[in-house]
């Protein structure tokens, strides 16, 4: 018998020696620490350093400006639906406020406008939301206005006749609204 532990072919009762896991774990923790410290230091340098002064680029000699420098910038043609109302309309309802509100009832024929303004510049984030819903009793007729912005003064034409209220929903803005009968 060549095997001192028992029968031939029988495995010994103990496993072969294992590698010591401590050096591997120490290496991993060391690398993690260095990455954390190095990354944290890099972040500190990025946040703490003043940005380098930027020098203006020298003008290219091979390119010419497409628009002469004294030309005023072109303004797009204004949408007629967003222009303030003509002075000939009859104001049927006028209201203003902040936050949410339902206006008084008004009756219109098939040609009228909603003139509205809002100013959200006092909002801490500088912008706000204004929505106007046309309602007849509890029934929603239309949602013609829902805007995010800082400030506006617009008019939206309407073509539905009836007796309505306007439901204004405003987040962070002061607003005015008018229902104007147009000839």
Image (cartoon, rainbow, N blue to C red):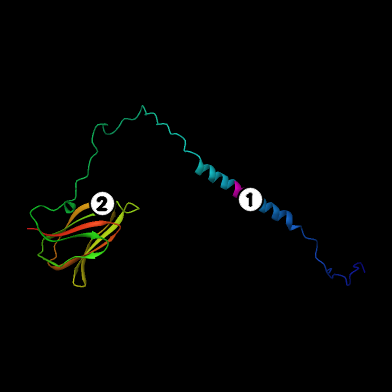
Tally of numbered discs: 2
Question: To which residue does mark 1 refer?
Answer: 33
Q: Quadrant of the C terminus?
A: bottom left
- Name the residue beneath numbered marker 2: 151
Rendering coords of residue 84 (x, y %): 16, 52
Query: Is 59 in front, or is 154?
Result: 154
* Mark 2 to mark 1 CA distance (whole Å): 51 Å
Q: Which residues are magenta?
A: 32-37
Image quarter where the N terminus lies is bottom right
Viewer-side residue, 75 vs 154: 154
Q: Quadrant of residue 73?
A: top left
Residue ID at (26%, 51%): 151
Residue 66 located within the stretch drawn in magenta:
no
Please tell me whether mark 2 or mark 1 is closer to you in this view.
2
For the point 29% across and 58% down, the residue is 129
Within 10 angstroms of label 1, few (less than 14), some, or many (20 or more) residues?
Answer: few
Q: Is residue 35 magenta?
A: yes
Viewer-side residue, 30 vs 18: 30
Residue 101 lies, in percent from the top left, at 23, 65
- Residue 68: percent from left, percent from top: 26, 31
Q: Which mark is residue 132?
A: none
């Amino acid at each position: 018998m060549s095997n001192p532990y028992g029968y031939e072919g029988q495995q010994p009762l103990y496993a072969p020696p294992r590698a010591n896991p401590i050096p591997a774990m120490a290496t991993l923790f060391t690398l993690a620490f260095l990455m954390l410290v190095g990354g944290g230091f890099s972040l500190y340098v990025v946040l703490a350093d003043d940005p380098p002064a930027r020098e203006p680029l020298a003008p290219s000699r091979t390119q010419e400006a497409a628009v002469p420098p004294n030309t005023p910038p072109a303004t797009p043609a204004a949408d007629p639906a967003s222009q303030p109302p003509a002075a000939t309309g009859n104001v049927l309802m006028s209201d203003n406020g902040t936050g949410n509100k339902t206006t008084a009832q008004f009756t219109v024929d098939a040609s009228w406008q909603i003139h509205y303004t809002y100013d959200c510049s006092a909002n801490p984030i500088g912008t706000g939301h204004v929505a106007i819903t046309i309602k007849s009793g509890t029934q929603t007729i239309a949602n013609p206005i829902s805007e995010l912005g800082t400030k506006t003064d617009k008019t939206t034409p309407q073509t539905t006749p009836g007796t309505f209220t306007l439901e204004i929903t405003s987040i962070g803005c002061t607003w005015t609204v008018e229902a104007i009968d147009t000839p």
